[in-house]
């Protein structure tokens, strides 16, 4: 079977087909030519850009030494002026204190503080007014000792301050216990006519004490609210019929958390203090007493001071009637921290030599196995400590034939041992009936960004725990909590330390010469800090009260401490990146940025950029524009800048660009410092204003930026 023959093409069809093939060949040749021209143009463009880059790099390299020297000179001049100013202020403060001829001792002088403790210990006065005044003085000394402890430069100083701190804390609690015992001796003479029991509230700026003496022993009694104090309690039937007194002591200070840190944390003195480290790092108490004495033998004077303190000490466990007082004191010793001194990083060259700054070492003993133990790094107690305590009611005076007779006891105030009696432990109602209840109005001196958590004190282990607490409820409108516990414990209210991290955005905007506004949009709360000279003022649109904190001018360190105590934390430490997602920036590159941003804080506005998270750990990116005044900078005025270890450049992309690129702006040059990069892009008037910036303002801005690290945690 033969195949079908193909039809022959006509001449016209052959000509057309040949023409199509010719056209296709021409198109391919044209496309190849265009592609070759495009590639040649791209090559020439790359070559041109490379030549430009080579020229810029050569120019940058040529002036690098000069720029670094000029920056070093500016930074060292400011740093020297700040150090001199702080030294002058410290000397003036010492002189003013000396000229006051005050009876309050200098906590840095061991002999003075020992004399104060000894005289106060031997003072039998239990008058309420007198004791509260003496406690106020002691608390002031404790605050000064805590500051000295944070800044201790040697082991000898650290041990001395710690001993004085512990003794003062013991004495404060002991004196309050003795004052309470004296009040309760006269409970029968101060009976409430409605209930037949004694109830009293004692209050000053440091504490609020609610006392209730069960004189009637009515088993029908259930609860009592101290409305003027914002606290209340609930008892079991067993306790309602017992010879007891209930004390709820709210101290606005927190000595127990300090004790816990001393017991479970280790400290080593760093050779260089990190510019971003602001948190207190208390010493450990885990080593034996003989280790401390062995260390102190190296210094005769330090040993004599130690022996003097030990001879004069009055531990809380020896105070009248105080039981289980190891929950309030510590008698342990310290480790062997390394001696060192403080330096300020001011030179850009070190970025290439040392990529990571020496950290402030702090480790915690492995207590995390027990999930109920509170990590005082992850959580922060706020508003002080609430001591919920149960004591035996002291013997009351009786009248016999016109004579008032009262039994005298040397044992003082005795703790009432509360034992849980469960007749039917399998029944939930019976189990609940053995719990003691508490209700507390949240302190108005702190801000809880989220529902507070409650932790009770474990005296034997010296830490806070979250177990043993049940039926917790939180009324946000009334700012009130209530819960029940298995027994009577001191307790605290806590929130997560880094609840307001990471930041959503930030901006540093100049308001005038030596005046700027630093705004942070946190995870839960937005705030702004106005910086004027070396003074700062906190502001927020959120209604939180705290009239003593908001809209008040104070120094940067004072504002930082006040914000931390109030629960408003936007400050970082060496632990923050363990709990907060960050951009993972090189610390020295970041610090260099803050150092030079502060020089232009009177001239330029700086703000966050979404590209900062995409440029790698070795670079940071921020928005910058020349600006001044209370109004926000226009959106089209911002430019992006890339900061690295050795090169600073203006970028071609904008915040609204679709793709990230490190291409430099065509109208800009490379510089070896951020300061010179900014000088290229601001007006002559702006450069003049930057050179007129006060060293105190520059230091305040830099300290605030280093303390918050917005380039890392936004």
Image (cartoon, rainbow, N blue to C red):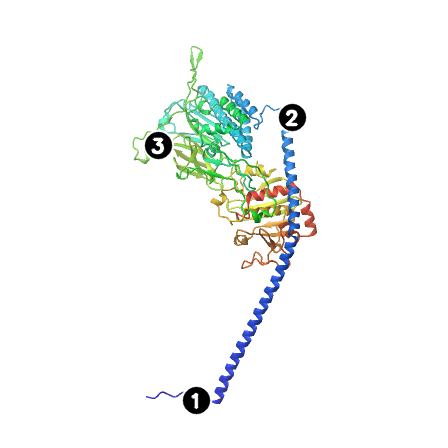
Cβ atoms at labels 1 and 3 below 8 Å apart: no
Q: From what the image shows, is residue 11 above or below residue 473? A: below
Q: What's the mark number on residue 433? A: 3
Cβ atoms at labels 2 and 3 below 8 Å apart: no
Give the mark nearest the N terminus, 1 or 3: 1
Real-space Cα separation, disc 1 to disc 3, in angstroms:
110 Å
For label 3, count other residues whose C-alpha is less than 10 Å away and answer few (under 14), some (14-19) or many (20+): some
For label 2, count other residues whose C-alpha is less than 10 Å away and answer few (under 14), some (14-19) or many (20+): few
Real-space Cα separation, disc 1 to disc 2, in angstroms:
124 Å
Q: Position of residue 209 (x, y in %)?
A: 48, 27
In the rendered image, is residue 477 in sight?
A: no
Q: What's the mark number on residue 8? A: 1
Q: Is 469 or 300 nearer to us in this picture?
A: 300
Give the mark nearest the N terminus, 2 or 3: 2
Name which residue lies at 70% across and 50% down: 685
Q: Residue furthest top?
A: 401
Q: From what the image shows, is residue 578 above or below residue 401? A: below
Q: Position of residue 477 (x, y in %)?
A: 47, 40
Q: What's the mark number on residue 99? A: 2
Q: From what the image shows, is residue 495 above or below residue 35? A: above
Circle 1 sits in a helix, a strand or a loop, which is it? loop
Q: Position of residue 405 (x, y in %)?
A: 43, 13
Real-space Cα separation, disc 2 to disc 3, in angstroms:
61 Å
In the rendered image, is residue 687 in sight?
A: yes
Q: Is 533 or 312 nearer to us in this picture?
A: 312
Between circles 1 and 3, the one closer to the viewer is: 1
Give the mark nearest the N terminus, 1 or 2: 1
């Amino acid at each position: 079977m033969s195949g079908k023959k193909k039809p022959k093409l006509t001449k016209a069809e052959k000509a057309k087909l040949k023409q199509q093939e010719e056209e296709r060949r021409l198109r391919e040749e044209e496309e190849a030519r265009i592609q070759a021209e495009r590639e040649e143009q791209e090559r020439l463009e790359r070559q041109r850009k490379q030549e430009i880059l080579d020229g810029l790099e050569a120019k940058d390299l040529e002036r690098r030494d000069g720029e670094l020297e000029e920056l070093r000179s500016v930074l060292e001049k400011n740093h020297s002026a700040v150090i001199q100013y702080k030294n002058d202020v410290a000397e003036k403060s010492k002189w003013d204190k000396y000229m006051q001829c005050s009876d309050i001792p200098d906590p840095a002088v061991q002999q003075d503080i020992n004399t104060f403790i000894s005289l106060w210990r031997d003072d039998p006065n239990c008058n309420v007014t007198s004791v509260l005044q003496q406690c106020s003085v002691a608390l002031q000394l404790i605050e000064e000792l805590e500051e000295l402890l944070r800044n201790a430069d040697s082991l000898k100083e650290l041990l001395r301050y710690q001993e004085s701190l512990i003794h003062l804390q013991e004495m404060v609690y002991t004196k309050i216990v003795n004052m309470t015992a004296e009040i309760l001796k006269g409970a029968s003479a101060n009976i409430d006519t409605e209930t037949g029991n004694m109830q009293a509230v004692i209050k000053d700026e440091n504490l609020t004490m609610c006392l209730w003496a069960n004189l009637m022993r009515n088993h029908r009694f259930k609860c009592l609210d101290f409305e003027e104090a914002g606290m209340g309690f609930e008892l079991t039937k067993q306790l309602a019929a017992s010879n007891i007194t209930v004390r709820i002591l709210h101290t606005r200070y927190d000595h127990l958390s300090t004790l816990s840190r001393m017991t479970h944390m280790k400290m080593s003195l760093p050779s260089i203090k990190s510019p971003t480290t602001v948190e207190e790092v208390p010493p450990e108490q885990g080593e034996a007493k003989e280790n401390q004495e062995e260390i102190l033998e190296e210094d005769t004077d330090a040993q004599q001071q130690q022996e003097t303190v030990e001879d004069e000490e009055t531990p809380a466990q020896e105070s009248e009637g105080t039981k289980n007082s190891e929950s309030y004191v510590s008698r342990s010793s310290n480790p062997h921290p390394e001696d060192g001194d403080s330096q300020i990083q001011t030179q850009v060259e070190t970025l290439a030599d040392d990529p990571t700054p020496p950290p402030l070492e702090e480790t915690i003993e492995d207590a995390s196995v027990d999930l109920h133990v509170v990590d005082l790094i992850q959580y922060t107690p706020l508003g002080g400590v609430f001591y919920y305590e149960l004591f035996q009611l002291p013997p009351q005076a009786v009248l016999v034939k016109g004579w008032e007779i009262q039994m005298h006891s040397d044992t003082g105030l005795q703790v009432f041992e509360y034992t849980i009696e469960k007749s039917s432990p399998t029944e939930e109602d019976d189990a609940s009936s053995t719990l003691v209840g508490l209700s507390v109005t949240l302190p108005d001196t702190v801000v809880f960004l989220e529902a507070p958590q409650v932790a009770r004190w474990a005296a034997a282990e010296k830490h806070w725990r979250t177990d043993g607490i049940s039926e917790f409820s939180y009324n946000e409108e009334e700012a009130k909590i209530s819960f029940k516990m298995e027994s009577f414990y001191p307790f605290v209210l806590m929130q997560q330390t880094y609840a307001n991290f990471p930041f959503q955005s930030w901006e540093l905007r100049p308001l005038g010469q030596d005046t700027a506004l630093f705004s942070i949009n946190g995870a839960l709360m937005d705030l702004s800090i106005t910086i004027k000279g070396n003074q700062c003022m906190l502001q927020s649109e959120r209604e939180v009260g705290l009239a003593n904190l908001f809209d008040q001018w104070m120094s940067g360190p004072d504002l930082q401490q006040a914000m931390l105590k109030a629960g408003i934390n936007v400050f970082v430490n060496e632990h923050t990146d363990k709990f907060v997602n960050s951009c993972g920036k090189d610390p020295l590159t970041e610090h260099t940025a803050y150092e030079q941003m502060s020089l232009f804080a009177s001239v330029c506005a700086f703000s966050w950029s979404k590209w900062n998270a995409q440029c790698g750990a070795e670079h940071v990116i921020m928005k910058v524009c020349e600006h001044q005044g209370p109004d926000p900078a226009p959106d089209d005025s911002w430019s992006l800048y890339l900061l690295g270890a050795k090169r600073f450049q203006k970028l071609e992309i904008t915040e609204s660009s679709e793709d990230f690129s490190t291409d430099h702006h065509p109208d800009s040059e490379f510089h070896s410092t951020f300061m010179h990069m900014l000088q290229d892009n601001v007006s002559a008037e702006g450069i003049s204003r930057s050179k007129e910036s006060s060293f105190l303002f520059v230091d305040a801005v830099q300290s605030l930026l280093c303390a918050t690290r917005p380039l890392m945690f936004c």
